[in-house]
Amino acid sequence: MIVLAVRWYLRYALSYRDVEEFPAERGLAVDHVTVYRWVQPFTPLLIDTARPCRHSPGDRHPMSLDVKRRSPV
């Protein structure tokens, strides 16, 4: 639940008070300061986890370059 709240904060640019409402809907009493304290240590972990999934420019080729042309029969 903590990581999900931090992810919402980072992904959707919500305020701490907005994120505070999501756990409250599930029955968890969370203060906006608590959400702030969660964001501080978990943000670097989420960034490091997401980084390998990103593609750098030029690391993928269009399909047309991978297909070899056949000589006419």
Image (cartoon, helix red, strand yellow):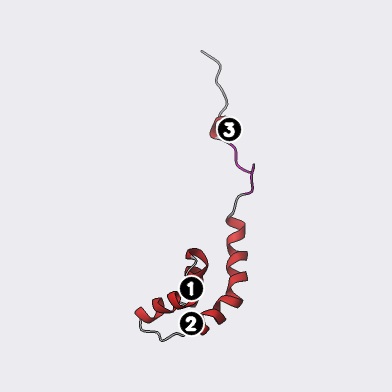
Q: Residue at x 59, y 54 (%)?
A: 54
| Measured Cα–Cα span from mark 2 to mark 3 | 51 Å
Residue 1 lies left or right of residue 37; in this view the side is left
Residue 58 image-quadrant placement: top right
| Measured Cα–Cα span from mark 2 to mark 1 | 9 Å
Q: Main secondary structure of the magenta part?
A: loop
Label ID, residue 15: 1
Q: Is residue 50 magenta?
A: no
Find the magenta span and give its range. Answer: 56-61
Q: Is residue 53 above or below residue 34?
A: above
| SS class, disc 1 | loop
Residue 37 image offset from top left, x and y in percent: 56, 82
Q: Residue at x 57, y 68 (%)?
A: 46
Q: Which residue is mark 2?
A: 32
Where is the N terminus found, in terms of image quarters?
bottom left
Instruction: Looking at the image, tell me whether mark 2 or mark 1 is earlier in sequence order.
Output: 1
At label 2, the amino acid type is His
At label 3, the amino acid type is Asp
Q: Which residue is mark 3?
A: 66
Q: Residues within 10 Å of mark 3 (few under 14, many from 20)?
A: few
